[in-house]
Image (spheres, rainbow, N blue to C red):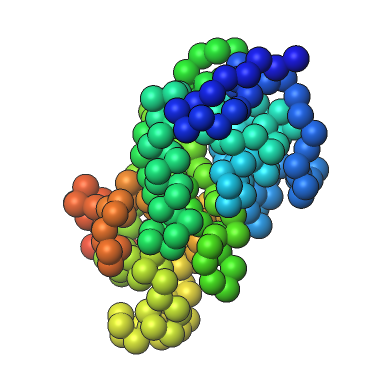
Amino acid sequence: MSSRTRDRTGVETASIITAARTEPAPGLGADPDLIGGMRLRPDARALQLDRYGRVVRVSAGLTRWIGWTGAQLAGRPFELVLHPDRRAWFRHRFSILLTDASPHFVGLAELTATDGRLAASHVTAVAVRGTEPPADSVLVLLTPENRVRRPQLTEVGSRVLEGLAGGASTAELAASLHLSRKGVEYHVTALLRQARVANRTALVAWAYHCGVLVPGSWPPRLAPEAREHIRPRGRAASS
């Protein structure tokens, strides 16, 4: 039987170390690489949370990294995987995310693996919304601290990325950047290929996750470190 503990909010939760099993939450399917409606690459470390912060799906890459499976975490608060010192931070940022005040948040945290070790990770949480707030679910991307890879961008590609992060459509980007719609799609495709993600929402999440975009900035803007490495000519790297 799982031991019980109380976190700082007084909400009873199962101890993450002793929680061994649970019934799968509704929607927990057989495809662990389909997270938040997005098909991620097999090595992606990701989770899908409901609006209450409970785990809905876990990617196979996350299971290989820290051991927890979808069956073990389904229906449990994601914060239980975090080091206790970072749980209040996550709850606070998650509550802001749900109010539509910010479409994402990023930060550093340590995760507790099934073998008891702590894994330092960059955490990126992105709201997956329907037609209006609150968020239908939240996509959480995790990258080991020593594996964050900053991409190479062209000047136009960087401006397209900033526009996408701000919610601009293809037509709006074409007008503001003096490109054709096909030109915009070319740059979006190049960015998707470099990030190895399937859609624009995941692309923006990836950009914040890699430190390409400045967290908390509106309108979205490129981080100074990323701007220093912009390629003046040619296509964005594809790998």
Q: Residue at x 57, y 19 (%)?
A: 5
Q: Residue at x 52, y 44 (%)?
A: 140
Q: Quadrant of the N terminus?
A: top right
Q: State whether residue 205 appears in this view.
A: no
Up the image or down, 73 lies above or below 190; here it is: above
Q: State whether residue 169 appears in this view.
A: yes
Name the outermost residue toward the front.
10
- Please tell me how many numbered marks the rendered image carries: 0
Q: Residue 76: percent from the left, percent from the top? A: 64, 34
Q: Residue 213: percent from the left, percent from the top? A: 31, 54
Q: Residue at x 40, y 46 (%)?
A: 93
Q: Residue at x 53, y 62 (%)?
A: 134
Q: Residue 165: percent from the left, percent from the top? A: 39, 64
- In the rendered view, does 17 fall on the left or right side of 157? right
Q: Image quadrant of residue 88? A: top left
Up the image or down, 231 lies above or below 181; here it is: above
Q: Image quadrant of residue 54? A: top right
Q: Residue 149: percent from the left, percent from the top? A: 38, 40
Q: Nearer the viewer, residue 122 or 53?
A: 53
Q: Image quadrant of residue 237? A: bottom left
- In the rendered view, does 79 fall on the left or right side of 160? right
